[in-house]
Image (cartoon, rainbow, N blue to C red):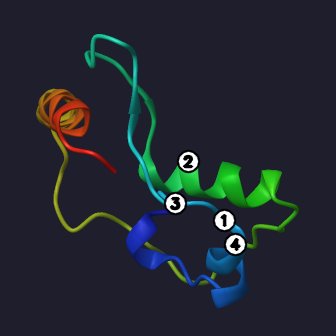
């Protein structure tokens, strides 16, 4: 489920610790290990919430995504996260 198409009940956000969404990369920030949507869903499930998916509502990206561009962004984000406190 793409993050932009999620409907999240407020009590889920109240129960989870921040950050709610996070890109997870390897230590070198060269490999994407978990995307924001999967990260959020895993956190919600670990907190005891159930994830529902409405297959009648198609959800897709508006544009094609270049994975090299995403990895570059992840690397930049990881560097910024180290320099900036949460």
Badge 4, how many Cα within 10 Å: few under 14, some, many 20+? Answer: few
**For mark 2, what is the residue?**
39
Residue 20 visible in the current orientation: yes
Spatial distance from mark 3 to mark 2, Cα to Cα? Answer: 12 Å
Spatial distance from mark 1 to mark 4, Cα to Cα? Answer: 20 Å
SS of the residue under disc 3: loop
Quick check: marks 4 and 3 in contact, CB under 8 Å? no
Side of 15 relative to 73 (left or right): right
From the top left corner, tell me how far across and down residue 77 is, in percent.
19, 38
SS of the residue under disc 2: helix
The nearer-to-camera label among 2 and 4 is 2
Q: Could you say which disc has been placed on residue 82 in the image?
A: none
In the rendered view, tell whether residue 25 sits above or below residue 81: above
**For mark 3, what is the residue?**
18
Q: Residue at x 12, y 33 (%)?
A: 76
SS of the residue under disc 4: loop
């Amino acid at each position: 489920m793409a993050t932009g198409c999620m409907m999240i009940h407020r009590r889920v956000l109240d129960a989870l610790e921040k950050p709610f969404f996070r890109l997870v990369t390897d230590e070198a920030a060269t490999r994407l290990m978990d995307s924001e949507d999967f990260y959020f869903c895993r956190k919600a499930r670990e907190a005891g919430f159930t994830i529902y998916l409405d297959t009648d509502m198609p959800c897709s990206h508006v544009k094609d995504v270049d994975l090299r561009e995403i990895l570059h962004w992840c690397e930049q984000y990881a560097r910024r996260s180290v320099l900036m406190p949460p």
